[in-house]
Amino acid sequence: MRRLSVFGATGSVGQSALDLVRRDRDAWQIVVLSANSDVAELARLAREFTPEIAVIGDPARHDELTAALADTNVGVAAGADALVDAARLPADLVLAAIVGTAGLAPTMAAIEAGCDVALANKESLVSAGELMIAAAQRSGATILPVDSEHNAIFQCLAGGRLDQVRRIILTASGGPFRTMPAEAMARVTPAQAVAHPNWSMGAKISVDSATMMNKGLELIEAHHLFPVGLDRIEILVHPQSVIHSLVEYVDCSTLAQLGSPDMRIPIASALAWPQRMATPCAPLDLAAIARLDFEAPDEERFPATALCRAAIAEGGARPAQLNAANEVAVAAFLAGRISFPAIIDTVKRVLDADAPAVPGALQDIFSVDAASRAAAQHFVDQLEHA
Ligand code: NAD
Ligand code: MG
């Protein structure tokens, strides 16, 4: 039995992972299940998977969760510090599937404790990449990428070494507005933006896919996970999301990883690594798919990837600033407060400020995160009342 903790258990990635665990129940012992505020769903999962502890992020819901699990042996805790404490409990693998920088502290705690981490929470790596990679090197924790592109690259790298890589090609679906003229984007609704053509995902990452910010964040993620040099990481639009990324070696041999667009495939790869586990996913039917299309990204209509490339090239706390501004802007768009193009405008305005000091510790990242959120909130308020 392997001990597994699932942070963000009620989310899209968390539920997909638990679906795999459910199919091979005897192989896994669940240590932690966490959620932000959905007590009913967390309690339901806790009854099914009997973790050592269930943690609710919102401290105001502690009593509610305690009552919901009173007749079980599951421990109960609440609040941000409890998430960090739970991340330090001994586990063979910690699935980091909280969305946003809310996942940073528990993910870092797991890494510092030397636990291997299956990383879905890309925002934590974007904000604190250097610190996180350094912590993993110190503690010996392995970071196994769950993001489908990075999981694909990780698998393709089994065939070679980083210093033999000529290019990493990060594929992008292009999102729901891939062919939409720029003028029409001012009118898109949150419902249209979260309706991804290929993947079913949480609201925040779905909006990020629509702005292409997701691919920009993934460029930064790839830069930290696979340090081949930023100029060796390219983005290629591939609308069918069948090829999840490619690695080209110095001999011009290119390896790709393919699969149906079902997150359970990369999640299974990370959970079972270095083994393989069976999944209920649809195998690829290439004859039915018949063709795969590719096109260069359009950075005029979708400037987010260029913003991210510039932010990670500058380094320091710029990516943390960008990520925080984006989280605030996406939430404001989802709440109907700002238009779709205003998401990237808000991020740009926050990035207009002077570069924050280079972060030396996690606390510096939290400070930059908080200041950037306040700045983004200020621009959102201005836009809303303009
Ligand atoms: P989601 O919104 O469906 O779920 C998010 C989870 O995080 C929920 O369990 C929620 O309760 C928890 N959470 C949210 N805010 C929290 C807070 N403040 N404190 C504690 N817990 C909190 O999101 P998702 O789509 O599952 O994405 C999770 C992460 O995985 C994101 O970083 C996303 O970028 C990444 N990812 C997702 C997919 C996908 O297919 N959904 C693919 C690749 C990467
Ligand atoms: Mg991805």
Image (cartoon, rainbow, N blue to C red):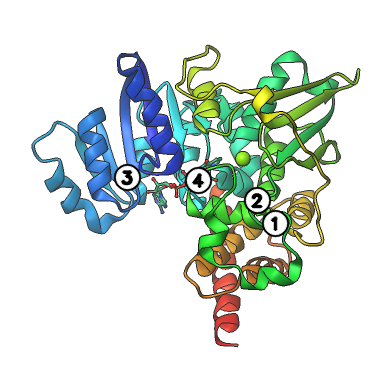
Whole-angstrom CA distance, mark 1 to mark 4, is 27 Å
State the mark number for residue 359. none
Q: How many marks?
A: 4
Whole-angstrom CA distance, mark 4 to mark 2, is 12 Å
* Mark 1 C-beta to ligand 1 under 8 Å: no
* Mark 4 C-beta to ligand 1 under 8 Å: yes
Q: Nearer the viewer, mark 1 or mark 4?
A: 4
187 lies above or below 267 = below
Pointers 4 and 2 in contact (CB under 8 A)? no
Question: Residue tagged by mark 1?
Answer: 318
Crowdedness of circle 2 by 10 Å Cα count: few (<14), some, many (20+)? many
- Note whether residue 327 is visible: no
Q: Nearer the viewer, mark 4 or mark 3?
A: 4
Whole-angstrom CA distance, mark 1 to mark 2, is 25 Å
Relative horizontal placement of residue 333, taking residue 298 as reference (left or right)? left
Earlier in the chain: of badge 3 and badge 2, it is 3
In the image, 276 versus 29, the foreground residue is 276
Pointers 1 and 4 in contact (CB under 8 A)? no
Relative horizontal placement of residue 75, taking residue 86 as reference (left or right)? left
Q: Residue at x 70, y 30 (%)?
A: 243
Quarter of the image where the C terminus is located: bottom right
Earlier in the chain: of badge 1 and badge 4, it is 4
Q: Quadrant of ligand 2?
A: top right
Q: Secondary structure at mark 3?
A: helix
Question: Residue tagged by mark 4?
Answer: 201
Tag 2: amino acid: Gly
Earlier in the chain: of badge 1 and badge 3, it is 3
Question: Residue tagged by mark 3?
Answer: 82
Residue 279 rendering spot, x and y as whole percentages: 46, 20
Tag 1: amino acid: Arg
